[in-house]
Image (tube, helix red, strand yellow):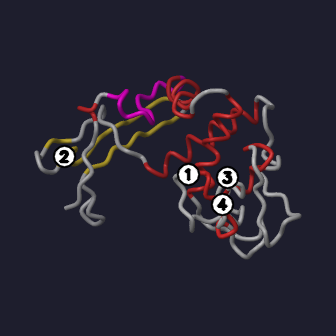
Amino acid sequence: MKEQDIIGMSYVGVKGGKIIEASSLGLKNIESNTPLSNDDIFRIASISKSFSATSIMQLVEAKKISLDDDFGKLVGFRIRNPNFPDKVITLRMVMSHTSSINDSQGYFNLDVINPDKNPDWAKCYNTYAPGADYEYCNLNYNMVGALIERVSGERFDNYVKNHVLEPLGLYGGYNVDSLDKSKFVTLAKK
């Protein structure tokens, strides 16, 4: 923790499907010098992509979608790299960051990549063919979240809570207003 300048961290060891060790080290809040506990919760940022991927795989196992489906057909508007208009961009490509899609137009709103809503939609695509290269892209996973809602009929945060977190006995969620704020770990830098 000293070497990496880590303020606080929690870990769990699992063996044979059972927790064999769980511990929290360091601080929950650096200003108040509050120690971190195993009941505290972190904002997980991009690690949330793991929950999105788990949700998608549940829908794949339920045969509601396929990893090789045309992603544009799944989300309801054309998703095609204009440099390779005949090359289908699949759900698998979107989830593995090989879709040739980029974040250059932003990623908080799906309208940035929708040709009917953004005249600059083509800038959301790289010059290489879908499936040919890798570029980490948040827009991919925002679209995956929209797909989870469309296919499941549930809001994304509710789907993850009901189908991933609660079955695993995990306390957390995407709707921070529904969580106990006293358990939040404060984001801070030394």
| Inter-mark Cα distance, 4 to 3 | 6 Å
| Disc 4 + disc 3, Cβ < 8 Å | yes
Question: Which callout, 3 or 1, points at the residue further toward the start of the chain?
Answer: 3
| Inter-mark Cα distance, 3 to 2 | 34 Å
**Label drawn at residue 97:** 4
In the image, is 25 to the left or to the right of 167?
Answer: left
For label 2, count other residues whose C-alpha is less than 10 Å away and answer few (under 14), some (14-19) or many (20+): some
Q: Amino acid at mark 2?
A: Asn
In the image, is 16 to the left or to the right of 6?
Answer: right
Quarter of the figure with residue 159: top right
**Label drawn at residue 95:** 3
Q: At which x and y percent is residue 33?
A: 12, 46
Question: Which callout, 4 or 1, points at the residue further toward the start of the chain?
Answer: 4
The segment highlighted magenta reads 167-179
Q: Mark 3, mark 1: which one is toward the viewer?
A: 1
Pointer 2 residue: 29
Q: Amino acid at mark 3?
A: Met
**Quadrant location, the C terminus:** bottom left
Q: At which x and y percent is residue 8?
A: 26, 50
Dominant secondary-structure state across the stretch colored magenta: loop
Helix, strand or loop status at disc 1: loop
| Inter-mark Cα distance, 4 to 1 | 18 Å
Question: Which callout, 2 or 4, points at the residue further toward the start of the chain?
Answer: 2
Q: Is residue 64 above or below residue 53?
A: above
Magenta stretch holds residue 169: yes
Helix, strand or loop status at disc 2: strand
| Disc 3 + disc 2, Cβ < 8 Å | no
Q: At which x and y percent is residue 169?
A: 47, 24
For label 3, count other residues whose C-alpha is less than 10 Å away and answer few (under 14), some (14-19) or many (20+): many
Q: Amino acid at mark 4?
A: His
Q: At x 24% / y 62%, what residue is drawn?
A: 2
